[in-house]
Each structure stands twice: as structure tokens, then as C-alpha cells.
Image (cartoon, grey):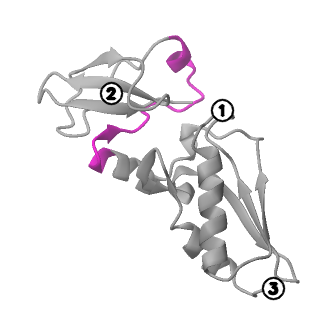
Amino acid sequence: MVKHTSKEEILRLLDQVFDPEIPTLTIREMGMLRGVEISEEGKVTIRFTPTYSGCPATDLIKVDIKAVLQENGIEAFEIIDVLSPPWTTDDFTEEARKKLRDNGIAPPVQATSDKSFVLDSPKTVPCPYCQSENTELLSNFGTTACKALYRCKSCLQPFDYFKCH
């Protein structure tokens, strides 16, 4: 039996799926959820874009999507990987950027159209704690591969910076 539901209900359910590496952000806030369609027969199609092709969290996110749908009686669904256009940090919602700052992670400061991040770290990464721009790069690798470790020279707090990509 196919459970009939609305797109809004599916989006509400998917707002329970968080990125395991940044558990304060949902896949929708991160821009990984690219679309939801429901056929006339009630089959749900989820369009999903991973942050990058080798992201270790991708399989777990898909397991979580499947679990939240099935726990709510939705059995007829498919998850389709959308690899083009690729995900970039430009896909973060403003709410995601705010949540990153509120949780001590500096959001990306440059649009991905600026490729200087490939060659060097951003010159100014504001501290998510005190908003000082007097910060320094400690390591190109933070708590996950997609983050760098910085320190604020004003408040002395270390913090992750979510790298642009």
C-alpha cells in the first residue's frame, strides 16, 4: 500500500535528518536536499546531493532519510543522487550559516566562484565567538576534512572554519 502524503509533510520529515558531521544542520539547511517529488501514485522521489563524492557521511545520511520515511509509514520512495551541479558551500541557507556561528564554527566567507581558497586560506575569517577578524590559521585540517582549524588572537578561542568548496 502506498501512503499518500504532501510535499510539505515530506519536507517536514526530512528536516529531522541532520548531517552527522555537523549535527546542528539539517540536509535541507546545508543545501543537500535538491528536491522532493510525489507521483500521482504516491511514490516519493528524494533528490540528494552529497557535499563531495567521497564524503564519509553520505551513506549514513541516506540511511537516516530511509529511516525517517519508513518510521512514518512511507515505503514507496527512492533517493536519487544529483551530482550536477555539484554541491558547494554557496548552498548553505542563511539559517545554516547562523547555526554554524552559534555553534562556534565560522561559515565560509567567500563565494565558491572565488577560487583563491584552492590556493590559499582566506585572509580574514571572523571569529564565531567574538566576531574579531584578528584570527590565524593553525591547520588546514580541522575536526573534519571539510574544515580548517583557526584561533582568534583576540579572545584566544580555537574554532573550526568550514572551508569553501
Front-most of residues 137 and 81 = 81
Front-most of residues 133 and 150 = 150
Query: The residue tagged with tag 2: helix, strand or loop?
Result: loop
Magenta range is: 101-119
| Circle number at residue 54 | 1
Q: Are marks 3 and 2 in contact (CB under 8 Å)?
A: no
Query: The residue tagged with tag 1: helix, strand or loop?
Result: loop
**Nearest to N terminus: mark 1 or mark 2:** 1
Front-most of residues 53 and 132 = 53
**Nearest to N terminus: mark 3 or mark 1:** 3
Measured in 3D between alpha carbons, the distance from the residue under mark 1 to the one under mark 2, in whole angstroms, is: 26 Å
Is 112 inside the magenta-drawn segment? yes
Is 113 inside the magenta-drawn segment? yes
Residue that mark 2 sits on: 125
Q: Amino acid at mark 3?
A: Val
Q: Position of residue 100 (x, y in %)?
A: 36, 46
Q: Amino acid at mark 1?
A: Gly
Q: Amino acid at mark 2?
A: Val
Residue that mark 3 sits on: 2
Q: Quadrant of the C terminus?
A: top right
Q: Residue at x 13, y 26 (%)?
A: 156
Task: Give the class, few, some or many, for how many residues have Cα within 10 Å of label 3's Cα (few <14, many ≥20).
Answer: few
Q: Residue at x 26, y 39 (%)?
A: 128
Q: Position of residue 99 (x, y in %)?
A: 36, 52
Image depth: mark 3 or mark 2 in front: 3
Measured in 3D between alpha carbons, the distance from the residue under mark 3 to the one under mark 1, in whole angstroms, is: 34 Å
